[in-house]
Image (tube, rainbow, N blue to C red):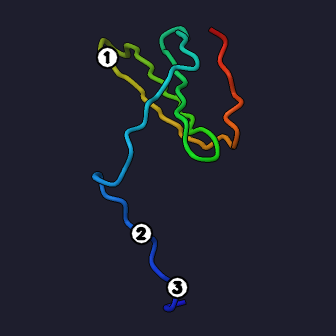
Amino acid sequence: NQDEPLPKVINQADSANLEWETVNRQGLGRGASMTLRTRVPGGWLVQVRYKESRFLNNAASAGVGVGLTFYPDPDHLWKLDK
């Protein structure tokens, strides 16, 4: 519908700095993964990073993956074991 307002574009000056905290970090053979979270209104943004290094035919190769999801937790009850 042409009468609907366009979403506001947020520029860098308007955005807040996100403070990421490590939830989990582990090595997986030739790879490693890390899970991070940051508090946002209504819950958490959760980020998973994965990196794999290996050698094939005497040439190094690497695979990198990143996933991002929202975890609803309005009262921010998710506590980490220290």
Where residue 45 sits, quadrant-wise, is: top right
Relative to 9, say whether 3 is above or below.
Answer: below
- Residue at the disc numbered 1: 60
Q: Which mark is residue 80?
A: none
Secondary structure beneath dot 1 equals strand
Of marks 1 and 2, the one in the foreground: 2
Residue drawn at x 52%, y 9% is 27
Looking at this rendering, what residue extends furthest in the front direction? 75
Residue ID at (69%, 28%): 78
User: Which amino acid lies under the numbered mark 2 shown in the image of this protein?
Assistant: Lys
Quadrant for the C terminus, please.
top right
Q: Nearer the viewer, residue 28 or 24?
A: 24
Left or right, residue 73 beside residue 35: right
Residue type for callout 3 = Glu
Circle 3 sits on which residue? 4
What residue did someone put label 2 on? Answer: 8
Residue type (three-letter) at the residue carrying disc 1: Ala
Question: Which residue is located at x 55 percent, y 11 percent?
Answer: 26
User: What's the residue at 31%, 17% (across, down)?
Assistant: 60
Measure the alpha-carbon separation of dots 1 and 2.
Answer: 44 Å
Q: Is residue 80 left or right of residue 51?
A: right
**Is residue 9 left or right of 45 when viewed as pictured?**
left
Of residues 41 and 3, the one nearer the viewer is 41
Residue 10: image location, x then y, percent: 36, 60
Whole-angstrom CA distance, mark 2 to mark 3, is 12 Å
Q: How many marks?
A: 3
Q: Quick one: label 1, few (<14), some, or many (20+) residues within 10 Å?
A: few
Q: Say which label, 1 or 2, has the lower sequence index.
A: 2
Label 2 Cα neighbours within 10 Å, binned few <14 / some 14-19 / many ≥20: few
Marks 3 and 1 sit apart, C-alpha to C-alpha, by: 51 Å
